[in-house]
Image (cartoon, coloured by chain):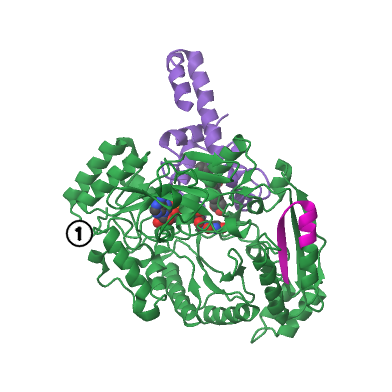
Chain colours: A purple, B green
Amino acid sequence: MMRILGFAMAGLLLTGAGSAWAAGELEAQGREVFAHWCEPCHGDGPTFPGTTALRAKYEGKIEPVLSKRGDLTPDFIKINVRKGVSVMPFFRKTEISDQDLEALAAYLTRQ
Amino acid sequence: MKLPPGVSQQDFAAAVKDFRDVVGAEWVFDSEEDVNLYRDAYTPFWQEEEELVASAAVAPDTVEQVQEIVRIANRRRLPIYPISTGRNLGYGGSAPTLSGSVVLDLKRMNRVLEVDERNASILVEPGVSYFEAYKHLQAAGSKLWLDVPDPGWGSLIGNAMDRGGGYTMPMYRNHFEAHCGMEVVLANGETMRTGMGAMPGCKSWQQYKTGFGPSVDGLFSQSNFGICTKMGFWLMPQPEAYLSATVSVPKYNDLIPLIDTLNFLENSAITNGMPFLGAPLTNPGLMPGDEVRRPPAAELMELLATPGGPSDAQLEKLARDKGMGMWACRLQYYGPPEVIRAQWAYSRKKFEAIPGATFSEPELLEMPLTPEQIAKVHKVVFGVPNLDIFFIGARSETVPQPSDGHIWFSPIIPRTGEEVLRAQRVINQAAVELGLPGVPFPAVGTYWIRSFMFLYGFPIIKDVATNKKNRESFRKLITIAAENGWGEYRTAPAYQGDIMATYSFNNHALLRFHETLKDAVDPNGIISPGRYGIWPKHLREGRRKP
Ligand SMILES: Cc1cc2nc3c(=O)[nH]c(=O)nc-3n(C[C@H](O)[C@H](O)[C@H](O)COP(=O)(O)OP(=O)(O)OC[C@H]3O[C@@H](n4cnc5c(N)ncnc54)[C@H](O)[C@@H]3O)c2cc1C
């Protein structure tokens, strides 16, 4: 499905409107990656261990829900995903490909 | 980069090139950065020479590619280490048991091949995670439940191959026993199907487990005799309802009749969900792992700190003062409302034989649950995959210093109250002597019917000295447990040899049998050398633990 969309988009990318659309597309892909690989720990609610940990880490000074944060940078996300932190392990490329990671970073740093 | 023993740089390079031809360059990982992603994130050897690390990884997409890879590995005598989803955290992660092995990463093979709604089964490839299988069933409108372990990102096959467990009915929550039919790529590159799958055109592969003649499936679990490429599993039809209720008993020694009664009820299938058993003083809701989420009450801490430890009577009194049982068991039931209410009523009658037993009001939920309900319940009990369990060790208000993972010491112990209390005393004393946190109350794993698991967690932190000390302590616990007849059900590669050595009846006859098989089915010793202490001939020297 992603592959077919990518193919159809190739022509559009030549125009400015196309690239804005492509950015939206990347974010949408990133949202999917997030929902599958991150949300079970970083979701919005009392039972998510990532969110609980970040709430304790920042003592409420920074939004604990990753997908609602405004201060993340692509590099910070990529380092955490490929190096892991505390009980959160790193992710292999058969799980989250480099392209998925670009999309994830785009989604988490969207304006 | 570490190469496996006896493999030359040329042979390694030639094999990697051949792997590229088979799966495409994109799916062979040999840069340091990529290979590092196959490290065990919860390794007890972090930053030590002994850490088990891969030399490369290869990720096929089809059974034919797996066969080709095996043939190449055989030609070059190159060890490969198959993983399904590689999320075996606490038991080795995605790292091999022999450094320098090439990890055979089957995550890309993630197709659900068949769901049989009428006979309640599923046939999957290795890369299918519980999350993915669940999504698939939901999208198909299936009325079948998965049985899931705590972490939903593992796979039906990977978890079963390590003999993991889940949370619904006994016949489903033992994940290896819930399987029905396997396809295996053998070390010579051939595919083999077990059970009814050995008969061409047979339609009951997922319906009758043992087929004809010797049943060999068990040989492939916790071993290194083949690579599983397909596996069928029996699924549980969604029940009409679920009921949960708790029985509490007042006296310390009431644990004995409590467990005897539970055994009768479980072995008779009168209670058919997983029982949670414990001391409400440390875990009021009897939720597995909750001890670490809430610090114990101040009075209990005080009591536990008394020199020589509290007496049984003191503990009983504290529990009574707090309006709790000394012990409690939360029972769970699946089925039609009228049936499970009756099953609970009967269970209650049986427990009433214990003087002073008290009972909670039963809580009944009708299925299917709404998303709002799912968000509030203990999800695994309803077959809903999730990652909530990672609160263990993670930072929280009560745990300001998070760990970097954990490893469990989890021997199987007999299912009697006497033995649970004895294990608690022995392991507590050993822990205290080793300078580890004590275990004032037993943490009893109730995954399996017929036996218990005694759970003792070791945190992993990225500190060499601490990890070294913990490894020594872990090994000491293995020995002490074995002296008492308590043997581990599963363990991380760091300890697999040590534990295999404790299953030593008649001069290690069982291990020697495994080795005979290994030599016969994998003469070059290319599949997962060392897994569960089984080494191929050329690497066996000096490896066997006395
Ligand atoms: C907080 C926490 C809670 C946990 N709770 C549970 C729990 O409730 N129940 C439980 O069972 N486990 C539990 N675990 C342990 C572990 O995470 C799970 O068992 C997990 O499912 C195993 O990882 P996996 O499914 O990705 O298997 P994999 O890592 O893919 O496989 C495990 C091993 O099996 C062998 N193997 C895998 N696939 C194949 C194959 N196709 N052919 C041949 N050999 C193969 C390999 O040796 C591999 O290393 C827990 C771990 C943590 C950290």
> Residue at the location (46% across, 73% down)?
B474
Q: Is residue B464 left or right of residue B14?
A: right
Q: Residue beneath label 1, please? A: B6
Q: Secondary structure at mark 1?
A: loop
Residue B325 image position (x, y, % from top left):
77, 73
> Residue at the location (46% across, 12% down)?
A15
Q: Residues within 10 Å of mark 1 (few under 14, many from 20)?
A: few
Residue B221, image quadrant: bottom left
Q: Which residues are magenta?
A: B328-343
Residue B71 image position (x, y, % from top left):
25, 47
Magenta highlight on residue B334:
yes
Q: Is residue A86 visible?
A: no
Residue closer to the observer: B47 or B538: B538
How many numbered markers are drawn?
1
Residue closer to the observer: B451 or B303: B451
> Residue at the location (61% across, 66% down)?
B446
Height in image: B500 above or below B153? below
Q: Is residue B509 left or right of residue B269?
A: left
Q: Is residue B400 visible?
A: yes
Residue closer to the observer: B219 or B243: B219
Q: Is mark 1 within 8 Å of ligand 1?
A: no
Pointer 1 indicates a residue of which chain?
A: B
Residue B423 image position (x, y, % from top left):
57, 79
Height in image: A95 above or below B398? above
Q: Amino acid at mark 1?
A: Gly
Q: What quarter of the picture does the C terminus of chain B occupy? A: bottom left
> Residue at the location (75% across, 59% down)?
B244
Magenta highlight on residue A104:
no
Residue A58 image position (x, y, % from top left):
61, 50
Height in image: A49 above or below B539? above
Residue B99, image quadrant: bottom left
